[in-house]
Amino acid sequence: MTSDHPPEAVVDEFVTFCRKTAAVLLRKKIAGGTLGLNRISLSIEDLALDCVADLFSRNPEGGFIQLKVYLRGIDVGAMTEAELMAHLRRLVFAKVNQGMFRIYNDIDPSLGRIIRNIKISIHALENFVIVNRFGEQYIVPAACDPLEHLPSIEPAMMQEELRQMAGKTETIPNLLARLSYCLREQEQHCRLVPLVQVALIFRSLYSATLAEADTPSEAEMATSVSD
């Protein structure tokens, strides 16, 4: 696959690997409640292919550009097959997460804006760290024990905690600060929470405002305006 003209049989095998790996991650997202297909008019297999499609773009000489650049950063010859497979899975998982962010923007613009503004806020304030866990993007409060050995906190519990502390005029940075406080203060659950799940909870806190207004809510716009 790293040559300028890989055999078509090898290309077919690589495409199949990428599609199947992406489909496994998408099924995990569905099972975890961070992805629903009710608003996406694609099967899991088609969605998987859509997410990883740009991995198959070629340069004029016929080489796979993105794959060659990615593999330049690792010593392929010194790796076991299992290590190389792990790197390829990481590449596919990254493409799926990027693809889902693009799809959220297309089919659910308000959720896409909230996800974007959460990332902007985290980058600006560094009160959270974004980590990849089993192919899913999670956030965890910075400089504290993530308590990974404990069970995940239920979304309803997290939402209720924030609802008690937050009002409809809260901005995304303030909501993130309150979420950080809630996660740090408790010691019964894992402090890693899925990024998309957090975005869905933030939006639910503003659902009344979104229903009453045609313009984007405070939650959607606050961070991008201040940035």
Image (cartoon, rainbow, N blue to C red):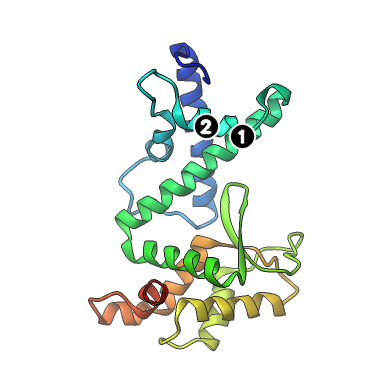
Query: Which amino acid type is marked by label 1?
Result: Gly
Taking 42 as reference, is 207 above or below it? below
**Residue sitting at x 58%, y 30%:** 71
| Snapshot quadrant of residue 225 | bottom left
Q: Residue 182: image x %, image y %?
A: 64, 79
Task: Mark 2 and mark 1 in contact? Answer it, CB < 8 Å.
Answer: yes
Seen at 51% across and 51% down, the residue is 29
Residue 149: numbered disc: none
Which residue is under mark 1? 73
- Mark 1 surroundings: few (<14), some (14-19) or many (≥20) residues within 10 A: few
Image-based side of 20 in relation to 146, left or right: left
Q: Is residue 213 above or below residue 22?
A: below
Residue 36 visible in the current orientation: yes
Residue at left 47%, top 44%?
Answer: 96
Whether 98 is drawn above or below 189: the answer is: above
Q: Which residue is mark 2?
A: 69
Q: Nearer the viewer, residue 63 or 21?
A: 63
Whole-percent x, y for residue 205 in the image: 43, 79
Secondary structure beneath label 2: helix
